[in-house]
Structure formats: structure tokens, C-alpha cells
Image: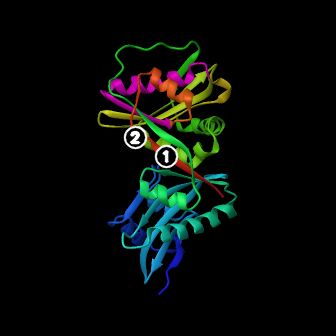
């Protein structure tokens, strides 16, 4: 019996979840949303053969022009490359109809990099991780005229505008993703200049570690120390609660971000992740 490609939204969610929890070859992107939430989004497809799920992939849009590979799981006994080619093809057709122009994917594994290369993806950048393993000891310098306060949900409208202005499309979060990030982070703050919100940060925390998940300053107000003050605020806040280990990710091409974090005594780790992209 030939296999079928079906939209995940047309299949029982428990069956999809059960397959994803099985002993499959798998990739999961860092995501604020669960796989179950991705099932009903356009760009999520499964291969079904003899009424059994053999592979599942989600490549869903983040904004009108850009989509990301969210996950790929395939039965270890199946043809991994064939399954990937069919599923990514179905996702590409859907994304093209929606007007998306670029599809991006992280490639932390050599097998996934090979699959992406075979489908025309090309290296676009790398994600680097920086680590700082000690808390703030002294009160750091402050910048004149900058006020840092806790972010509220009402601030998200302005935060969305900052995010869209500060990041290239591949790295922007849509309003729903930003709100999800807000609700799932442990500390979020905004920077004000002359009573106007011009930057923000959102950070996660677990036990004695914290991660700077999102940092942006509106381009009109960059190079005034705002990003530095927001990053310091994160360090100060978590250090006060006993956190001793801090991390942050950025692109290797983002020289200004790398310089900022290194000036705050973050050290670059030796496990970069390749970012690949495909024009669609």
C-alpha cells in the first residue's frame, strides 16, 4: 500500500503525540510552543502507511515572509531522506501559497544537515552560546536617563513594534510568539528613555541558572547603552535570587551582540549550531 501525505490537522492528535514520543530519529527546534500546538498550523504534515504514522514534520511560518522547521521525526526503519523530501515538499507548497519567501532550520546533527543540503538548503549563519558562571558582585554602572522597569502585558504592543524594527525577518517573533515568551519567562523588563519604551529583555530561569532569551533595542536608540543596561538588569535580578550561572545565544554574524555579551564577561562556548536557509 503506497504511503500518503496528510496534514497533521486531519489526524488524531493523540496518535501524532504517541509517534513523537516513540523511539524515532528526531529533531526538535527550540520552541515556545508544544508540538501539539504546531499540529494544527499550516506546514505540519505526516506520512501514513498501512494506517501507521511513519514520519512527521512541521515547517510553519513565524511571520508573513519567514518560516522555520519546528520538528522532524521519522521511524528509524523508514527511508529518512525520502520521508524528509516528501514532507518538506508538502510544507514548501503550503508556505509558498501563504506568501512565505524563506524557510530556515537549525542543523545541530550531521544527519539533519545532510537532509537539508539534499533539499537545497544552504548555510546561512551559526548560533553561538555564551556562558557566564558567576553572579554580579558589585553594582554595575548605569546610563544617564535610562529607566528599567518590569514589563507588563500592556507593554507587549510596543514590544512587538521594537521586535519587528530591531530584527531581520528570520529572527522576528510574531505577536502570539512574543506573548507566549512573555508568559513563559521568569523575568522581563523594558528600558525607557524620556518615558518612552525603547528596548526590552525576557529571560528564563531554572534552579541556579538563567538564560537571556530575548533582547532588543529599537534601531533609533541603539548605541546608547540601552542593550547593556537591560542585560545588566537581567544579571542583577537573578543574582539577587542566588543564580550563579548565566547563558545567552546570538548569531555569529551579530558582531555588536557578541561584543556586548563579552564585555559583560560572558565566554563563548565551543558548540555552535549551524543555521540553514532555503529560498521558497
Element under disc 2: loop
Residue 213 visible in the displayed image: no
Residue name at image x 44 percent, y 68 percent: 80
Q: Quadrant of residue 94?
A: bottom right
Residue 239 in percent (x, y) is at 35, 24
Residue found at the far bottom of this picture: 1
How crowded pointer 1 is (Cα within 10 Å; few <14, some 14-19, many 20+) is rated as many
Residue 208 in percent (x, y) is at 30, 33
Residue 127 in percent (x, y) is at 48, 41
Position above or below: 221 against 4: above
Residue name at image x 61 percent, y 40 percent: 160
State how the image is colored: rainbow
**Disc assigned to residue 274:** 1
| Residue position marked by numbered label 2 in the rendering | 271
Residue 227 in percent (x, y) is at 54, 25
Answer left or right for 246 relative to 123: left
Position above or below: 120 against 56: above
Q: Would you say the residues marked 2 and 1 are in contact, meaning their CB atoms lie under 8 Å apart?
A: no
Answer left or right for 34 relative to 221: left
Residue name at image x 52 percent, y 58 percent: 116
How crowded pointer 2 is (Cα within 10 Å; few <14, some 14-19, many 20+) is rated as few
Q: Nearer the viewer, residue 6 or 33?
A: 6
Element under disc 1: strand
Q: Quadrant of the C terminus?
A: bottom right
Q: Which residues are magenta?
A: 223-250
Query: Does the magenta-highlighted stretch encompass residue 20?
Result: no
Query: Does the magenta-highlighted stretch encompass residue 247?
Result: yes
Q: How many marks?
A: 2
Q: Nearer the viewer, residue 12 or 29?
A: 29
User: How far apart, in angstroms, are the residues tagged by discs 2 and 1?
Assistant: 10 Å
Amino acid at each position: 500500500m503506497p504511503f500518503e501525505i496528510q496534514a497533521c490537522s486531519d489526524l488524531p492528535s493523540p496518535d501524532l503525540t504517541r509517534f513523537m514520543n516513540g523511539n524515532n530519529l528526531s529533531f526538535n527546534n527550540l520552541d515556545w510552543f508544544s508540538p501539539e500546538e504546531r499540529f494544527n498550523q499550516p506546514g505540519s504534515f505526516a506520512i501514513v502507511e498501512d494506517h501507521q504514522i511513519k514520519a512527521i514534520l512541521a515547517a510553519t511560518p513565524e511571520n508573513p515572509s519567514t518560516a522555520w522547521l519546528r520538528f522532524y521525526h521519522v521511524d528509524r526503519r523508514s527511508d529518512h531522506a525520502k520521508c524528509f523530501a516528501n514532507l518538506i515538499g508538502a510544507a514548501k507548497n503550503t508556505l509558498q501559497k501563504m506568501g512565505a519567501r524563506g524557510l530556515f532550520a537549525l542543523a545541530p546533527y550531521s544527519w539533519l544537515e545532510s537532509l537539508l543540503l539534499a533539499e537545497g538548503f544552504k548555510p546561512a549563519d551559526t548560533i553561538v552560546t555564551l556562558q557566564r558562571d558567576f553572579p554580579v558582585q558589585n553594582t554595575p554602572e548605569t546610563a544617564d536617563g535610562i529607566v528599567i522597569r518590569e514589563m507588563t502585558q500592556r507593554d507587549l504592543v510596543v514590544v512587538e513594534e521594537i521586535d519587528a524594527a530591531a530584527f531581520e525577518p528570520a529572527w522576528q517573533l510574531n505577536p502570539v510568539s512574543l506573548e507566549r515568551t512573555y508568559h513563559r519567562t521568569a523575568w522581563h523588563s523594558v528600558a525607557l528613555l524620556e518615558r518612552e519604551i525603547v528596548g526590552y529583555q525576557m529571560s528564563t530561569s531554572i534552579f541556579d541558572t538563567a538564560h537571556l532569551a530575548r533582547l532588543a533595542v529599537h534601531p533609533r536608540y541603539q548605541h546608547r547603552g540601552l542593550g547593556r543596561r537591560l542585560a545588566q538588569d537581567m544579571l542583577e535580578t537573578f543574582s539577587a535570587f542566588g543564580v550563579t550561572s548565566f547563558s545567552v545565544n546570538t548569531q555569529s554574524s551579530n558582531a555588536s551582540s557578541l561584543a556586548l555579551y563579552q564585555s559583560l564577561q560572558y565566554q563563548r562556548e565551543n558548540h555552535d549550531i549551524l543555521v540553514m536557509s532555503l529560498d521558497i
